[in-house]
Image: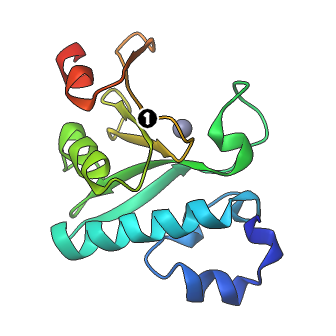
Amino acid sequence: MIASALTSHDHVARWPQVRLDQFKALGGMDVEFMDALNRLCDIAEKRNGWTHRINSDYRSGGRAGSMHRVGKAVDIVFYSRTPGDVDVWTQFDFAVGSRLMMRVGAYPFWNTPGLHVDTKPARLYWLCDETGAYRYALEPDAVKELA
Ligand SMILES: [Zn+2]
């Protein structure tokens, strides 16, 4: 089910921890993915005092196989006071450790470093390096060694 099947009142009631105002295409997001994202953002706030910015959500274009195209991915920056003030690998460890997201990508070279997270049912981790090239690993620690 996608979020457009619910009312905007339902969205706010169901995902109170997510900055829904920052989504460009909330209606295209998958409801179960949003449930997981809500839990992730809830833990981020309660455990670490972090809020977040959503850089990208559902989008119809992009690479074939992208979880953004099925509303099961966001690009997100966790931060304390201003975006960029939490190290990308601290964000990465948090998202991986939550076990709520199957795949976590680290983007240290965004203006404000952050993550791609999605729920494709096959664990995978990656780094987007300074040239824009993707380096993949099956274990999160292996990704950090590529950095
Ligand atoms: Zn992404």
Q: Eyeballing the image, is 37 above or below 131? A: below
Screen quadrant of the N terminus: bottom right
Q: For the residue carrying disc 1, how many other residues have a C-alpha within 10 Å: few (<14), some (14-19), or many (20+)? A: some
Q: Helix or strand or loop: what does disc 1 sit on? A: loop
Q: Eyeballing the image, is 122 above or below 34? A: above
Q: Position of residue 5 (x, y in %)?
A: 82, 74
Q: Quadrant of ligand 1?
A: top right
Q: Position of residue 35 (x, y in %)?
A: 53, 70
Mark 1 vs ligand 1: CB under 8 Å?
A: no
For this view, does 104 lie left or right of residue 27? left
The residue positioned 58% from the left and 89% from the top of the image is 13
Residue 88's image quarter? Answer: top left
- Residue bearing mark 1: 123
The figure's colour scheme reads: rainbow
The residue positioned 73% from the left and 25% from the top of the image is 64
Q: Position of residue 115 (x, y in %)?
A: 39, 41
Which residue is nearer to you in this view: 60 or 126?
126
Name the amino acid, label 1. Arg
Q: Position of residue 91 (x, y in %)?
A: 25, 47
